[in-house]
Amino acid sequence: MNVQAEVSIYPLKTNAVGSVIDEFLKQLKRPGLELEIGTMSTLINGELPEVFHALAEAFALSATRERVVLVMKASNACPAKAPLR
């Protein structure tokens, strides 16, 4: 199932906000996923297992280094790449 997720990560109590976000995004860049990086959030398109696996790994790495908040919305309706049966 193709899904789209919108994610934002917010590092807390650190002066290294940009590097935490950059490392998080670097972890999401992998084959099979399309990223559209914005100023406040990132859209991730791909198959459900790959999207959630990438998010779990990127969050785990970020959370071991800094205190972070991850906000995520996921949909199987946008973008609609194939009709549901």
Image (cartoon, rainbow, N blue to C red):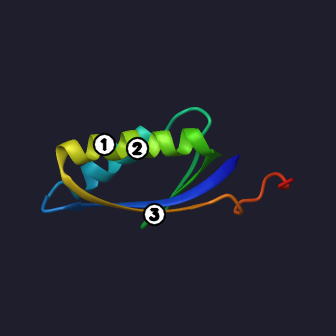
Q: Residue at x 70, y 62 (%)?
A: 78
Label 2 belongs to which residue?
56
Q: Which of these two is toward me, 40 or 44?
A: 44
Residue at label 3? Answer: 41
Q: Is residue 75 left or right of residue 63?
A: right
SS label for mark 2: helix
Q: Residue furthest bottom?
A: 40
The earlier-in-sequence mark between 3 and 1 is 3
- Residue 38, numbered circle: none
Horizontal and vertical percent for residue 35? 56, 49
The mark lying in front, picked from 3 and 2, is: 2
Count residues near mark 3 (Cα–Cα under 10 Å), then give few for <14, some for 14-19, many for 20+.
Answer: some
Tell me the element at label 3.
loop
Q: Nearer the viewer, residue 4 or 23?
A: 4
**Residue, disc 1:** 60
Measured Cα–Cα span from mark 3 to mark 2: 17 Å
Instruction: Say which amino acid is labelled 1.
Output: Ala
Asked if disc 1 and disc 2 are in contact, CB closer than 8 Å, the reply is yes
Residue shown at 79% from the left, 53% from the top: 81
